[in-house]
Image (cartoon, rainbow, N blue to C red):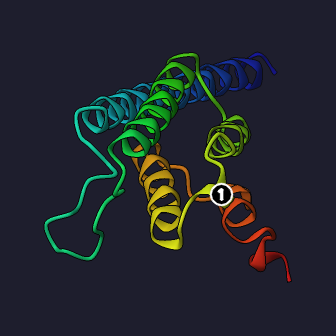
C-alpha cells in the first residue's frame, strides 16, 4: 500500500515538472512573439506610406497637405499598436484597435486608390503583429459592410 502512494507521489511530481516546463515554454514563446511584433512595428514607423511606390501602381496622394495628414494619422495608429503591444494585448483588443484606428480615416474623403492604400496599410499592421483578422473592421470601413458575413 505504501508503495502505491510513493508511486503516485512520484508520478504527480513528474506531471508537475512537465506542466511547469510547458508553461515556461509558452511564456518564452509569447515574449518572443511580442518582441518580434514590437520590432516589426518600430521598423514600420521609419517609412512613408502615402508616397508613390516604386512599381508605379500607387501614384501617391497628390496634395502634400493631405498626404501629411494621412501619414500623421497612420503613424499615430502605428504608435497606438506599439503601446498596445507593450501592454499585453489580446486578439480581440487588437481588433478593437484596428476598428478605432481605421475610423480616424474618413472614407468619403478618399478616392478609391487612397482608400485601398489605407486598408492595405492596416493589413500590413496586422501582419506585423500576427493578427489574422480585423473582425470585419477593414471591410466595414472600406465597403460599409462585411462581405464575409454573408
Q: Dot 1: few (<14), some (14–19), or many (≥20) neighbours within 10 Å?
A: some
Residue plotted at (31% across, 60% down): 60
Residue furthest right as drawn: 150
Where on the picture, by quarter, is residue 2? Answer: top right
- Residue 82 placed where, x, y %? 46, 25
Q: Secondary structure at mark 1?
A: helix
Vertical placement of 25 versus 17: above or below?
Answer: below
Report the side of 1 relative to 123 (left or right). Answer: right
| 127 and 98: which is toward the camera | 98
How many marks overall?
Answer: 1
| 97 and 5: which is toward the camera | 97
Vertical placement of 90 versus 107: above or below?
Answer: above
Where on the picture, by quarter, is residue 3? Answer: top right
- Residue 67 placed where, x, y %? 38, 45
Report the side of 48 relative to 110 (left or right). Answer: left
Residue furthest left as drawn: 54
Where on the picture, by quarter, is residue 72? Answer: top left
Residue plotted at (86% across, 83% down): 150
- Residue 148 placed where, x, y %? 76, 77
Residue plotted at (69% across, 67% down): 139
| 111 and 127: which is toward the camera | 111
Vertical placement of 148 versus 83: above or below?
Answer: below
Give the residue at mark 1.
107
Picture quarter with the N terminus: top right
- Residue 134 placed where, x, y %? 65, 55
Report the side of 85 relative to 94 (left or right). Answer: left
Amino acid at each position: 500500500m505504501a508503495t502505491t502512494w510513493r508511486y503516485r507521489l512520484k508520478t504527480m511530481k513528474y506531471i508537475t515538472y512537465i506542466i511547469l516546463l510547458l508553461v515556461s515554454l509558452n511564456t518564452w514563446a509569447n515574449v518572443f512573439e511580442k518582441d518580434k511584433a514590437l520590432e516589426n512595428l518600430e521598423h514600420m514607423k521609419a517609412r512613408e506610406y502615402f508616397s508613390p511606390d516604386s512599381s508605379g501602381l500607387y501614384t501617391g496622394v497628390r496634395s502634400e497637405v493631405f498626404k501629411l495628414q494621412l501619414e500623421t494619422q497612420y503613424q499615430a495608429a502605428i504608435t497606438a499598436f506599439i503601446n498596445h503591444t507593450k501592454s499585453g494585448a489580446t486578439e480581440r483588443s487588437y481588433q478593437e484597435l484596428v476598428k478605432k484606428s481605421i475610423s480616424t480615416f474618413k472614407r468619403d474623403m478618399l478616392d478609391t486608390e487612397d482608400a485601398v492604400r489605407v486598408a492595405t496599410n492596416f493589413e500590413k499592421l496586422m501582419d506585423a503583429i500576427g493578427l489574422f483578422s480585423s473582425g470585419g473592421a477593414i471591410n466595414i470601413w472600406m465597403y460599409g459592410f462585411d462581405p464575409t458575413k454573408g
